[in-house]
Image: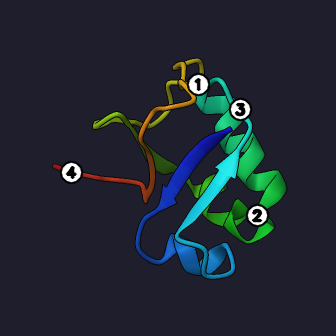
Amino acid sequence: MVKVLLWGSLADLAGGAREVAVEAATLRELLEGLARDHPGLRPELERGVSVSIDGRIYNDSWFTPIGPESEVVLLKRLQGG
């Protein structure tokens, strides 16, 4: 199981939970598990989110591995110029 910290208003979409656990070994599995287990997050996940894994931000790197002890933070999609 991977523990995921939900940053900011994303926690509200998961019933107020600031941290959730999901069975996942890759970024794709993580996002699919979050959508399945926390349907309130689905619209935001479909819009696109950023995921920090051990301090590095990923957006669309579907096959990025996630270890069981990884620090994972889900954030609204980071955009810059």
- N-terminal label among 2 and 1: 2
- Residue type of the residue flagged with mark 4: Gly
| 70 relative to 42, above or below | above
Q: Which residue is mark 2?
A: 38
Disc 4 to disc 2, C-alpha distance: 28 Å
- Residue type of the residue flagged with mark 2: His
| 44 relative to 23, above or below | below
Q: Nearer the viewer, residue 42 or 11?
A: 11
Spot occupied by residue 81 in the image (x, y as percentages of width and height): 16, 49
Name the disc covering residue 30, or none. Answer: none
Q: Residue at x 63, y 59 (%)?
A: 20
Q: Nearer the viewer, residue 18 or 9?
A: 18
Quarter of the image where one finds residue 54: top left
Q: Residue at x 80, y 65 (%)?
A: 39
Quarter of the image where one finds residue 1: top right
Spot occupied by residue 56 in the image (x, y as percentages of width and height): 30, 33
Q: Residues within 10 Å of mark 1 (few under 14, many from 20)?
A: few
Spot occupied by residue 75 in the image (x, y as percentages of width and height): 42, 57
Spot occupied by residue 4 in the image (x, y as percentages of width and height): 54, 51
Disc 4 to disc 1, C-alpha distance: 21 Å
Q: Is residue 51 left or right of residue 37?
A: left
Q: Is the Cβ of the residue at disc 2 closer than 8 Å to that at disc 1?
A: no
Q: Is the Cβ of the residue at disc 4 closer than 8 Å to that at disc 1?
A: no
| 50 relative to 59, above or below | below
Name the disc covering residue 62, or none. Answer: 1
By what rule are the colours in the image chosen?
rainbow
Q: Secondary structure at mark 1?
A: loop
Name the disc covering residue 29, or none. Answer: 3
Q: Residues within 10 Å of mark 4 (few under 14, many from 20)?
A: few
